């Protein structure tokens, strides 16, 4: 541990002693174990010091060498020999003779004796020696040398022979100029020699075999390695130069050469041998000969001279006897040969000398000696023979019988028994083996099957098992295991487990292409080669795991097939007997490649990478799969880096040129996700799922092949003779000729590499001209010349083939995606950084899946809730599983039950992982808890708290709210409720839409309704069924309609006692009380009107039609909810269309509002409802919105987000887009024959016409009621509807009665003075959304809070739908529109109260019950008493009578076809605030609203311009006035009496104003000309029309004097001359007077 600012003080060095040395010191060696110091001087003086006492160091030995300079000292490990590098004088060896001080047990004296010398190049710079006296020295000018000095270690060495002169051998692995060596070192095991070379680095040499130095590796560095040293544990190599120290860690070599490398088949050599059958081949123990048991062609012996490439099938010895197999005696002296067809069944041949005698020296495989013959007269062939492991028993398989021998002495084998093949056997007895315990014989019936003999009694073998498998070619007993390997012919390869004998049981089997013929185990039976005689050549199988054999690769050679295969005993080569000859194939590379494996680890936070070493692994798989041991196992998603280093290079210039992948028996280019860096010899692999193949968990064995290129130069073709039979010898000149010839033939490139287009398998030939140039044919015999040339060509061919090699690297790929049911902390593990998708699937019959909502996870669940999909990050998905998925079971779940759940995990990089678990074992599943009634908050107790004894009043708006904790469940938060009412039969049914009390939403326990007096005395029993979607709980409550409110009682009392107390006037004034009480309920929002602009308001009168509509809908639901009817209807394609309903009518019903929208876009003459909702102010919705409420809405939306299931009614009456299919509703009504009593007096066709008429009240009411009910079923849309409604009232339109005006534009289709003769006028105004206001409200629910959305306001419903689809997906905009429009039209869910009959644009009252419509002016009230007037509803006073109404003169009233019309055009003098009240016959106010008339500035400016033109023509009118006045009849005198004084004064005032243009302009500011057109009769002229228009309106013409009026009309801007119309003037004037008189009389 270190502390801050702590200083360390070096101890002071004290000089103990000073020793003077006579020469310049060059080297020093200190031997700590014996405490001696050896120093060398420049001129050859060597001195030894005893340092036992550090203050009294003294000399114990001196030796003066006759050399010029000593450059290096090395002391042997036994301290007996000092190796001196004497520079130009070479190497000297001094033997140290130590004399011991017996008293102090110390070396007292040392004498030096020179015992050896040797010349090392030009100068011996430094030498070191091994324990076995091999000396390695270097000359810094010429290189490395070594010598064997073991002679020094011989005992009884004659000292007279000293100094011994040792011969040094030069060695360097490269032909380049001599290296400049700077340092030398060996490891402690003395197996590796480290040589530091200037500018090249550190060379590592393998000196295990002292005379065969091999280069292992070069550690490259550009600096000068002056000194190299190993750490104490030799894990690090330290190299120093002039300025730095480098440390190189020792790593474990990873050579990937633990299996036969059969990928270099291009290096094979083919020898032609056209024999039909070649069953077996063998090599001798010294690899000098190849033996062939070639059936009827006999016994062949081929010399190979310990070099498999020297096999020449033209040179052989043939022994003419028929055989299929051989057995070699273990001492390597005898061969046992089973023969047939010659009366001899077994022969023993000697093929090697027994001793060194002359007689034995002639014996060889080419000259074998027969030593024993066993005769047996038979006509059957003997195919195979086998010995027991202890060689005590042998069995020979003959075609029809077995012979069992006592084989203790092969020269005297005894027949113990002969077993005859039984009759059931079909086929020849073939290969056999003896079990390791010598108890059983396992034999093959060729291509038929297997048999087992019990040989416990060797003299009486017994058949104990026989199995027909239609397979079997050869069998081979394992040397190391209790197993037998079987070539099964057409069925491949198998391993028999002999522990189960006599039962024949396979440990494993493997399918092999073609016909499996013969087996050859390699590397202690970790691998096996199988020959294929029909298709293919050989297959290499990894049988390290005997239960799971794995094919490594398959070898093909042209179109050849194989029979026999054998391997060299000491060399890594195979001989394969193929169809046309013998193929020599290497199965190990001449060099090694170390592969450093690392993983690039990626980190998310912080984003970085790290290179980590990757080790071999073992993998334990499921019971039905084999395990993998000590292999590289990569995972999908990993990034693996393989760094390659060539070890034991043949040539220092050899490089790794490319990487390939071995697939399907072919060498192919790498996939794109393999990236090879040639310069760095590095391969980066992005492990992808493609490497898994078709397997989900683990791939097949994957092999990449590293291609190494060895440059060829002229020196490559210099060949030396290996023995007397080797004639292929070349010198440097010949080698250069060969090299140049191959370049000219485009076989070799200029850089020394093989041309890619050259096929090395093709037989190499030299043309005659080059052959004559290469070898002088005249100096030797023709036969010798041909042999020499053949051997040279063969060597050149091998050189070319050896110029490149493939080294394999094998690995497996497994899925990184795992699911561990027992790991509760990490169920899913993967390398993926992408989104994880988990899908849980169950059988819908056993229950349902439930999830707990989380913001960071996306859930999707199927309609039947049998499939749940979870999406999110790995961490979040694991958290969801940790919190457990709820399973609502419909059957018992336990360990015995077979209820299962399937889980599929997809991480987007692996193949999807699917697993099946028993639900009872799933730790990520928890069973659903039951919903229950809260005992402390039952429904009845809550209703009693809200209403005493559960009694409610009549004629009252009732609101009932129950706690959300009435029903409780522990594992889900989403509970829905369904309300029922008890019928007369005692059964509970769903509350019909017509009931006075209605449930507001399915997710809340809220009820609203209005009681009427007809309900008095009724008791209603309700049932609430609560469900969390899986379990259900039920509770009930009772409501008694016994209460009578004060207002109702007072009214009733007054009616009863009215005659008695009438004198007091109380009855007459009863309405005052009710109007005060219900003032707010009947008040609608203020309406804005501008002067000169037409005003129109229409109110629809609804009487009995609403009850009829509720009756129809109630009975429709009653019929449609009957299961048998519903199922019957669903089976059909739909109710057949009524013949009385046209397709156009059906289409119009379904597309009502779409049609209206198109009509609205085309029309220009429709009248809007004049409103201004803060148009001069910017809406501040976002600021005013209650964020807490918005979050609650968003939470509620998220609860229902994945609830995609639709009810049967929704499926029936909504189309795919969500639009209402009203045609289906109408057809059902007709089909079920639902018809209210009101329509019983009309025909069925008339009733149908009412239903299909889009302008009929009954259709609109049905449409509204159906839509409202369907909206309640759609919880998400219901939430959005309530949100819009509340926001409109709270923020924009602060009036609950017409809140919809905040987002709805109203356009009336009719005007009372227009189209009066039209019969089919539409009583329903057009409605369309105010898209900007609606969008601003909905924007609050947009989590992204993207204000850019408001920059693009929808201008059509289709554009609004696109907005919903993108940001409010799941909301049914069509149902939303239906219900909002129903609110606007005034179609509520329940029948309105008689005290509040005005709903929306409708009044629910009999038209005969409307008494009058009265306008009120606002009083001027003192501000102090204003609250009292407001309380008593006396703020306004009545208008005076005008035209039999108490309305402003500009406002007119009309009632026709069930619609109240209020219309007119106010003028400037009408600017004021007017309160309009509509009374029923009891003088109750049923609706009231304020009309605020304001100035229209734009119209004012326009009129001023018009009157300027009139003023310009005033002078002309005066000139003509006198002329026309004489022609017109005089006005009757009684006309003057018609005008009141006020009229006269006004006329005089107006006349005076005409005198100036200024005064006329002032008048025009207070009067406007009526703009809307008036329908005229055909016989009226234009003047009549204008005159009538002016006389009937409140225009300025009414204020003019008669004469002025006449002249004004005649000289209007539209008429410049009166000459053509003077004859009609008299009639016009009379008509004006007549109409005025009529009006006055009225």
Image (cartoon, rainbow, N blue to C red):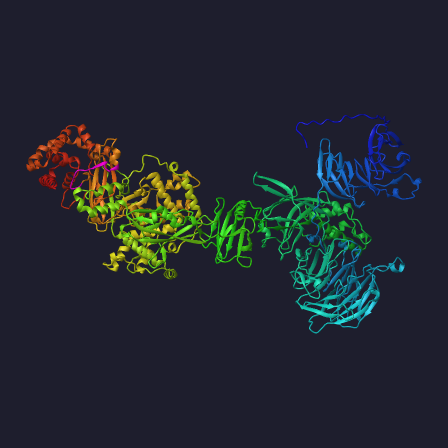
Q: Is residue 792 visible?
A: yes
Q: Is 1124 in the magenta?
A: no
Measuring from the top left, give residue 1227's x and y in whole percent: 32, 58
Q: Establish if 75 lies above or below 421.
A: above
For the N terminus, which image quadrant?
A: top right
As drawn, is 338 to the left or to the right of 1356?
right
Q: Quadrant of residue 1346?
A: top left
Q: Establish if 547 lies above or below 1190.
A: below
Residue furthest bottom as drawn: 423
For the C terminus, which image quadrant?
A: top left
Instruction: Specify start and end residues of the magenta stretch as a single range.
Output: 1431-1445
Q: Is 1433 in the magenta?
A: yes
Q: Is residue 1573 visible?
A: no
As drawn, is 1573 to the left or to the right of 1232?
left
Measuring from the top left, give residue 550's x and y in whole percent: 66, 56
Most common SS among magenta residues: loop
Total labels drawn: 0
């Amino acid at each position: 541990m270190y502390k801050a600012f702590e200083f360390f003080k070096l101890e002071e060095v004290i000089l103990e002693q000073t020793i003077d040395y006579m020469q310049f010191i060059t080297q020093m060696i200190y031997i700590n174990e014996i405490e001696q110091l050896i120093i060398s001087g420049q001129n050859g003086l060597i001195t030894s010091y005893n340092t036992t006492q550090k203050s009294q160091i003294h000399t114990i030995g001196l030796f003066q060498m006759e050399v010029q300079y000593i450059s290096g000292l090395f002391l042997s490990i036994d301290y007996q020999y000092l190796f001196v590098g004497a520079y130009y004088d070479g190497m000297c060896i001094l033997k140290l003779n130590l004399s011991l001080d017996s008293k102090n047990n110390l070396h007292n004296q040392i004498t030096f004796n020179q015992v050896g010398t040797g010349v090392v190049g030009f100068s011996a710079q430094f030498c070191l020696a091994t324990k076995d006296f091999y000396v390695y020295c270097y000359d810094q000018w010429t290189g490395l040398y070594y010598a064997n000095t073991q002679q020094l270690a011989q005992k009884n060495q004659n000292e007279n022979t000293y100094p011994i002169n040792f011969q040094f051998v030069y060695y360097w692995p490269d032909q380049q100029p001599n290296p400049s060596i700077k340092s030398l070192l060996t490891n402690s095991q003395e197996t590796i020699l480290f040589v530091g070379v200037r500018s090249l680095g550190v060379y590592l040499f393998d000196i295990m075999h002292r005379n065969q130095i091999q280069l292992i590796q070069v550690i490259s560095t550009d600096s000068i390695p002056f000194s190299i040293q190993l750490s104490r544990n030799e894990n690090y190599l330290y190299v120093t130069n002039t300025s730095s120290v480098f440390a190189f860690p020792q790593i474990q070599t990873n050579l990937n050469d633990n299996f036969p490398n059969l990928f270099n088949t291009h290096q094979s050599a083919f020898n032609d041998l056209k024999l039909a059958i070649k069953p077996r081949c063998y090599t001798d123990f010294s690899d000098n000969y190849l033996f062939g048991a070639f059936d009827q062609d006999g016994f062949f012996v081929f010399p190979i001279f310990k070099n498999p490439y020297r096999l020449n099938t033209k040179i052989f010895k043939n022994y003419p006897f028929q055989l299929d197999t051989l057995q070699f005696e273990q001492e390597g002296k005898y061969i046992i040969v089973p023969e047939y067809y010659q009366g001899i069944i077994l022969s023993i041949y000697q093929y090697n000398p027994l001793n060194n005698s002359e007689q034995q020296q002639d014996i060889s495989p080419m000259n074998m000696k027969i030593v024993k013959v066993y005769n047996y007269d038979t006509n059957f062939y003997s195919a195979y023979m086998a010995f027991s492991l202890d060689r005590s028993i042998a069995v020979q398989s003959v075609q029809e019988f077995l012979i069992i021998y006592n084989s203790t002495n092969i020269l005297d084998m005894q027949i113990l028994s002969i077993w005859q093949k039984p009759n059931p056997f079909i086929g020849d007895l073939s290969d056999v083996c003896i079990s390791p315990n010598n108890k059983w014989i396992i034999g093959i019936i060729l291509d038929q099957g297997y048999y087992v003999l019990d040989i416990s009694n060797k003299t009486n073998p017994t058949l104990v098992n026989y199995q027909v498998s239609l397979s079997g070619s050869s069998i081979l007993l394992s040397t190391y295991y209790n197993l037998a390997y079987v070539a099964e012919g057409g069925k491949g390869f198998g391993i028999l487990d002999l522990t189960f004998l006599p039962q024949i049981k396979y440990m494993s089997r493997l399918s092999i292409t073609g016909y499996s013929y013969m087996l050859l185990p390699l590397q202690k039976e970790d691998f096996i080669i199988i020959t294929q005689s029909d298709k293919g050549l050989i297959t290499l199988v990894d049988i390290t795991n005997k239960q799971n054999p794995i094919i490594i690769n398959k070898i093909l050679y042209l179109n050849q097939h194989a029979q026999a295969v054998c391997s060299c005993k000491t060399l890594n080569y195979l001989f394969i007997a193929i169809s046309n000859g013998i193929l020599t194939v290497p199965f190990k590379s001449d060099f090694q490649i170390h592969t450093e494996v690392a993983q690039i680890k990626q980190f998310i936070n912080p984003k970085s990478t790290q290179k980590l070493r990757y080790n071999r692994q073992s993998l334990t798989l499921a019971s039905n799969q084999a395990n993998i041991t000590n292999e590289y196992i990569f995972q999908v998603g990993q990034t693996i880096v393989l760094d390659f280093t060539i070890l034991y290079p043949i040539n220092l210039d050899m490089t790794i040129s490319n990487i390939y992948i071995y697939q399907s028996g072919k060498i192919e280019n790498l996939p794109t996700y393999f990236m090879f860096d040639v310069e760095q010899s590095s391969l980066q692999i992005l492990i992808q799922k493609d490497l898994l193949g078709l397997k989900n968990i683990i791939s097949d064995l994957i092999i990449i092949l590293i291609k190494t290129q060895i440059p060829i130069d002229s020196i490559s073709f210099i060949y030396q003779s290996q023995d007397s039979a080797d004639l292929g010898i070349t010198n440097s000149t010949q080698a250069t000729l060969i090299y140049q010839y191959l370049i000219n033939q485009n076989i070799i490139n200029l850089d020394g590499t093989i041309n890619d287009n050259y096929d090395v398998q093709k037989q190499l030939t030299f043309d005659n001209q080059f052959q004559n140039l290469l070898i002088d044919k005249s100096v030797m015999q023709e036969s010798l010349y041909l042999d020499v040339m053949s051997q040279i060509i063969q060597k050149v061919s091998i050189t070319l083939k050896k110029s490149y090699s493939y080294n394999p690297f094998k690995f497996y790929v497994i899925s990184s995606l795992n699911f561990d049911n027992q790991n509760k902390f990490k169920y899913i593990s993967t390398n993926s950084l992408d989104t994880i998708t988990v899908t849980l699937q169950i059988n819908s019959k056993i229950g349902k899946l439930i999830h707990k909502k989380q913001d960071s996870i996306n859930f999707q669940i199927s309609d039947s809730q049998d499939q749940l999909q979870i999406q999110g990050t790995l961490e979040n998905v694991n958290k969801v599983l940790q919190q457990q998925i709820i399973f609502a079971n419909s059957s018992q779940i336990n360990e015995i039950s077979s209820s299962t759940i399937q889980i599929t995990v997809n991480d987007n990089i692996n193949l999807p992982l699917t697993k099946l678990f028993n639900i009872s074992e799933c730790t990520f599943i928890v069973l659903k808890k039951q919903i229950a009634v809260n005992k402390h908050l039952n429904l009845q107790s809550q209703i009693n708290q809200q209403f005493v004894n559960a009694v409610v009043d009549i004629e009252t708006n009732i609101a009932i709210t129950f706690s959300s904790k009435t029903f409780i469940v522990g594992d889900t938060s989403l509970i829905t409720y369904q309300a029922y009412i008890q019928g007369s039969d005692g059964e509970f049914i769903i509350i019909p839409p017509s009931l006075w009390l209605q449930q507001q939403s399915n997710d809340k326990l809220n009820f609203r309704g209005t009681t009427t007096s007809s309900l008095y005395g009724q008791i209603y029993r309700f049932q609430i069924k609560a469900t969390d979607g899986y379990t259900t709980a039920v509770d009930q409550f009772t409501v008694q309609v016994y209460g009578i409110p004060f207002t109702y009682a007072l009214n009733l009392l007054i009616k009863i006692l009215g005659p008695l107390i009438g004198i007091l006037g109380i009855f007459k004034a009863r309405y005052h009380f009710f109007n005060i009480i219900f003032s707010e309920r009947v008040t609608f929002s203020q309406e804005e009107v501008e002067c000169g602009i037409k005003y129109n308001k229409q109110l629809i009168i609804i009487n009995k039609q609403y009850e009829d509509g509720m009756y129809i809908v109630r009975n429709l639901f009653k019929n449609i909810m009957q299961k048998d009817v519903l199922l019957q209807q669903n089976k059909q394609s739909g109710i057949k269309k009524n013949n009385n309903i046209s397709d156009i009518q059906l289409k119009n019903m379904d597309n009502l509002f779409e049609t209206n929208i198109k009509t609205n876009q085309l029309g220009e003459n429709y009248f809007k409802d004049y409103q201004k909702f803060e148009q001069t102010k910017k809406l501040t919705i976002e600021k005013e919105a209650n964020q807490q409420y918005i979050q609650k809405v968003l939470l509620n939306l998220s609860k229902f987000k994945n609830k995609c299931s639709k009810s049967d009614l929704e499926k029936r009456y909504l189309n795919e887009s969500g639009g209402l299919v009203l045609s289906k509703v109408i057809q059902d009504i007709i089909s079920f024959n639902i018809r209210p009593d009101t329509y019983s007096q009309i025909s069925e066709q008339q009733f149908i016409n009412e239903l299909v008429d889009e302008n009929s009240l009954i259709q609109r009411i049905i449409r509204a009621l159906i839509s409202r009910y369907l909206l309640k079923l759609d919880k998400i849309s219901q939430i959005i509807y309530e949100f819009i409604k509340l926001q409109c009232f709270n923020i924009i339109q602060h009036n609950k009665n017409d809140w919809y005006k905040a987002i709805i534009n109203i356009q009336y289709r009719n005007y009372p003075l227009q189209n009066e003769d039209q019969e089919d006028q539409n009583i329903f105004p057009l409605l369309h959304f105010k898209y900007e206001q609606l969008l601003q409200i909905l924007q609050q629910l947009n989590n992204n809070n993207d204000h850019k959305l408001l920059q693009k306001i929808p201008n059509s419903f289709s554009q609004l739908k696109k907005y919903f689809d993108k940001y409010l997906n799941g909301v049914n905009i069509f149902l939303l529109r239906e219900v909002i429009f129903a609110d606007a039209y005034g179609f509520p869910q329940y029948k309105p109260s008689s005290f509040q009959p005005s709903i929306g644009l409708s009044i629910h009252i009999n038209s005969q019950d409307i008494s009058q419509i009265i306008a009120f002016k606002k009083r001027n009230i003192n501000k102090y008493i204003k609250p009292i007037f407001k309380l008593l509803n006396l703020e306004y006073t009545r208008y005076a009578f005008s035209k039999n109404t108490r309305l402003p003169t500009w406002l007119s009233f009309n009632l026709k076809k069930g619609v109240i019309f209020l219309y007119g055009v106010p003028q400037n003098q009408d600017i004021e605030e007017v309160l309009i009240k509509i009374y029923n016959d009891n003088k109750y106010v049923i609706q009231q609203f304020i009309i605020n008339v304001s100035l229209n500035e734009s119209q004012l400016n326009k009129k001023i311009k018009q009157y300027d033109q009139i003023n310009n023509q005033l002078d002309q009118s005066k000139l003509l006035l006198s002329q026309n006045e004489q022609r017109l009849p005089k006005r009757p005198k009684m006309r003057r009496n018609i005008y009141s004084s006020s009229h006269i004064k006004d006329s005089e005032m107006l006349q005076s104003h005409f005198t100036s243009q200024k005064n006329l302009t002032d008048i025009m500011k207070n009067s406007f000309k009526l703009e809307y057109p008036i329908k005229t009769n055909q016989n009226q002229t234009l003047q009549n029309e204008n005159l009538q228009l002016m006389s009937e309106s409140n225009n300025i013409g009414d204020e003019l004097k008669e004469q002025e009026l006449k002249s004004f009309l005649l000289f209007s801007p539209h008429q410049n001359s009166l000459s053509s119309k003077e004859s009609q003037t008299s009639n016009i004037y009379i008509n004006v007077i007549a109409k005025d008189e009529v009006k006055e009389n009225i």
